[in-house]
């Protein structure tokens, strides 16, 4: 995971990409977010760093961070989140149906299986994105408690 400004700048240098104020601002904002952020929420917060940022500025910064594999877009939420497992081809997000909490899951086993399945069918996999819906640990436990209470 790219978490510090230093790591961010090192990665940009490595990829021969420029660190522009909008890119740096977008990174600084997203790294602090514990949950996915939409482009408009980002745009809103970018105004703390830049004067009068416009929607294309936010979208271009998001595109840049996504290309460098620093963040990922969660399609079903139309929002972005810092990526934990950057070395994996597969990214897995679990989204709670009850409270909306989003968590990135360890993709190691799924990644290996998808590589195998792709290869078996003659495909070369570039990327895969999986969104899991269900209940987070907290909501699952309260649902179970409620079920148990109903039984007594
Ligand atoms: Zn939940």
Image (tube, grey):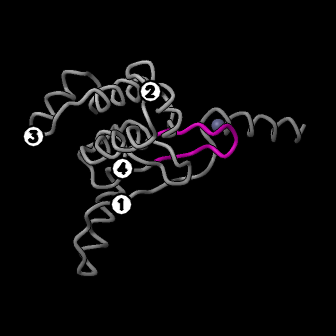
| Residue 40 among magenta residues | no
Identify the residue at horizontal 33%, vertical 46% (top origin): 63
In space, the residues marked 1 and 4 are separated at their CA atoms by 10 Å
In space, the residues marked 3 and 1 are separated at their CA atoms by 26 Å
Q: How crowded is mark 3: few (under 14 residues within 10 Å), some or many (20 or more)?
A: few
Span of residues in magenta: 93-103
In space, the residues marked 4 and 2 are separated at their CA atoms by 39 Å
| Side (left or right) of 100 relative to 125 | right
Image quadrant, ligand 1: top right
Q: In this view, does 26 lie above or below 127?
A: above
Element marked by disc 2: loop
Q: Where is residue 136 in the image (x, y as percent from the top left)?
A: 60, 39
Badge 2 is on which residue? 52
Identify the residue at horizontal 20%, vertical 30% (top origin): 19
State which tag comes first along the sequence, 3 or 4: 3
Asked if the residue under mark 1 is in contact with the one under mark 3, i.e. CB atoms within 8 Å, the reply is: no
Q: Where is residue 47 in the image (x, y as percent from the top left)?
A: 45, 23
Q: What number is the disc on residue 107?
A: 4
Q: Where is residue 83 in the image (x, y as percent from the top left)?
A: 35, 39
State which tag comes first along the sequence, 1 or 4: 4
Q: Is residue 133 above or below residue 105?
A: below
Between 61 and 94, the one nearer to me in the picture:
61
Q: What number is the disc on residue 16?
A: 3
Could you say which quadrant of the image residue 96 lies in? top right
State which tag comes first along the sequence, 3 or 1: 3
Badge 1 is on which residue? 128
Element marked by disc 1: strand
| Residue 100 among magenta residues | yes
State which tag comes first along the sequence, 2 or 1: 2
In space, the residues marked 2 and 1 are separated at their CA atoms by 36 Å
């Amino acid at each position: 995971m790219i978490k510090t400004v230093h790591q961010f700048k090192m990665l940009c240098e490595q990829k021969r990409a420029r660190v522009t104020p909008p890119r740096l601002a977008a990174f600084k904002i997203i790294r602090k977010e514990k949950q996915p952020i939409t482009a408009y929420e980002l745009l809103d917060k970018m105004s703390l760093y830049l004067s009068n940022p416009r929607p294309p500025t936010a979208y271009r910064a998001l595109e840049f961070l996504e290309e460098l594999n620093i963040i990922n877009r969660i399609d079903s939420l139309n929002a972005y989140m810092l990526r934990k497992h950057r070395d994996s081809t597969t990214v897995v997000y679990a989204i709670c149906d009850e409270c909306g909490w989003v968590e990135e899951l360890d993709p190691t086993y799924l990644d290996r299986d998808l590589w195998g399945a792709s290869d078996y069918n003659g495909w070369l996999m570039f990327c895969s994105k999986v969104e899991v819906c269900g209940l987070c640990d907290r909501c699952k436990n309260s649902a179970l408690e409620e079920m148990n209470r109903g039984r007594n």
